[in-house]
Amino acid sequence: MLKKDMQKIFWKVCDDYNKKHNIKHDPKTTFHHLIEEVGELAREITKETNDWRKEGFDKQKLANEINDVICQCLLLAFDYEIDLDEVFERKIKEWRERWSLD
């Protein structure tokens, strides 16, 4: 499925970057990057209704920040050997049962 391919692609890009810059990968650092990216996403969403910095809402910037959050989540899942395809299917089934949708 798409998520597993995305995980491998993003992991390879990060691994290449880390090797190029002699950085040792650490899942806890990935988590901190995720928190940073969520903050950047929040700032973009806030611009739509409360643009006190007068930067202007930009849907492409919002899309980029959503992508950054997704990529950090994919990397965390890779770090902890989580099969996102399996989790996704299980959670959808769980929600459908909980909300009596079947």
Image (cartoon, rainbow, N blue to C red):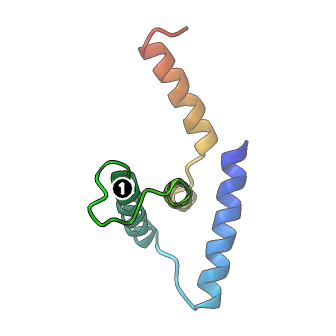
In percent of width and height, residue 79 lies at 53, 62
Q: Nearer the viewer, residue 95 or 66?
A: 66
Compared to residue 20, the image places residue 31 above or below, namely above
Residue found 38% across the figure and 50% down from its top: 48
Q: For the C terminus, which image quadrant?
A: top right
Residue 60 appears left or right of 100:
right
In percent of width and height, residue 91 lies at 51, 30
Residue 100 appears left or right of 75:
left
Q: Nearer the viewer, residue 15 or 61?
A: 61
Image quadrant where residue 1 sits? top right
In percent of width and height, residue 31 lies at 40, 64
Instruction: Count the numbered circles shown.
Output: 1
**Residue ID for mark 1:** 47
Q: Nearer the viewer, residue 26 or 92?
A: 92
Amino acid residing under circle 1: Lys
Residue found 55% across the figure and 29% down from its top: 90
Q: Mark 1 packing: few (<14 Cα in 10 Å), some, or many (20+)?
A: some
Q: Nearer the viewer, residue 95 or 39?
A: 39
Q: For the residue labelled by badge 1, is the local secondary structure a helix, a strand or a loop?
A: helix
Compared to residue 71, the image places residue 24 above or below, namely below
Residue found 33% across the figure and 65% down from its top: 54
In percent of width and height, residue 43 lies at 35, 59
Residue found 67% across the figure and 72% down from its top: 13
